[in-house]
Image (spheres, rainbow, N blue to C red):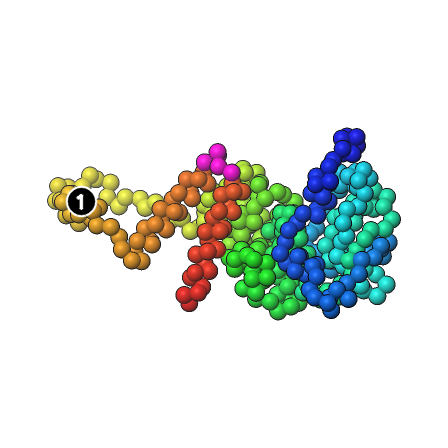
Amino acid sequence: MPQQRARLNTDQAKHQLGLNIGSPILAEIAGAKGSESEQEQSIEQVSLDLIQPNPFQPRRDFDDPGLQELADVMKSMGFFGALLGRRQQRHIELAYGERRVRAARMAGIQEIPIEIRPLADIDMFNIAVVENEQRRDLTQLEVGEAFVRAQEQFGLSEREIAERLGKSRGYVRNRIETARLPEDLKIVLRQTTEESFSASHARELARIEDQASRQEITEQVRRDNLNYQQTKLAVDDALGLHEPLEEPSNPEPPSREELETWREKHVIPIDQLLAQQKEQPRGVERLRVQAERLRKIAEELASDPRIDRQELREVLEQVYSSIFDLASDLS
């Protein structure tokens, strides 16, 4: 394997080392901003012992097998590019690149190049979240916890966070709700993958306030590998939201008069029914009809084992976010 990695070309190595992120926020902060910034920036060879992680790093899991692979690439091709950081007394605080620093330690590298800039806390937050988001390395819980910290420390609203990261408010709101879940659900999220137990599952289960009942249904969801719709039904059952079927009050068959009365009340004449079918819904009613059709389509797709659940969840979240944003603008 080491011989194969040694034959990686430069572009492949840069991809492996994370040098092709392409984030506009990183480009804005890390790039030149005029003569004053150019005078303040400098690239230094910094000992790994003096490097500290970004205090706003939302990432918890650094994937040890992947780190070893990255370290092997560094052994073969060296450390590409320079990271970004700020000076904190005698230490250098990373803006991004903690994974690469860990891999460099594993590869036996003593010093790495870091571009030193006078970055504010809000810059460090932006970079930490965006850099990981570009790689899709963060879970919804990790992103949500970073957003909550931004709200508390910088006083940012959901809209401001969304604008800074180029996301919708619905996207930000979903992840903040995930970060505010009960601790028992967050523990399960950290222990499982999004494919087997998603943040959508957890948010649905959070409707159960009693912790013992919630944990019981959570175990059922995990044990039976329930999808989102099945989880929602299980939660409704636990909350007693499904009305029981009423026993017929009269076991005798209805009389002719009762049947005639029922027909007059409920059966629509064929000519009237055809007229209703020809008349297309208009205005807001048309939106209600389309929303119901969309819901039924989503339910059918959710129960189809051939559909990629992660892709379906992302599409539904995008639809939800765009509609919620529009509704918020109308208020």
| 306 drawn magenta | yes
Q: Horizontally, is 186 left or right of 312 in the view?
A: right
Kind of element beneath mark 1: helix
Q: Horizontally, is 304 left or right of 142 in the view?
A: left
Can residue 239 be seen here?
no
Please state the horizontal and vertical placement of residue 261, each as a whole percent of the image: 14, 47
Name the residue type under label 1. Answer: Leu
Give me the residue at 61% from left, 42% from top: 193
| 177 drawn magenta | no
Residue topped by disc 1: 274
Give me the residue at 48% from left, 33% from top: 306
Start and end of the magenta stretch? 304-308
Give me the residue at 86% from left, 63% from top: 90
Quarter of the image with the N terminus in it: top right
| Residue 117: quarter of image | bottom right
User: Which of these two is toward me, 279 or 16?
Assistant: 16
Give me the residue at 67% from left, 47% from top: 20
Please state the horizontal and vertical placement of residue 176, each as a whole percent of the image: 58, 58
Badge count = 1
Please state the horizontal and vertical placement of residue 152, each as a whole percent of the image: 64, 67
User: Which of these two is toward me, 121 or 262?
Assistant: 121
User: Which of these two is toward me, 200 or 306?
Assistant: 306
Q: Horizontally, is 203 left or right of 139 in the view?
A: left
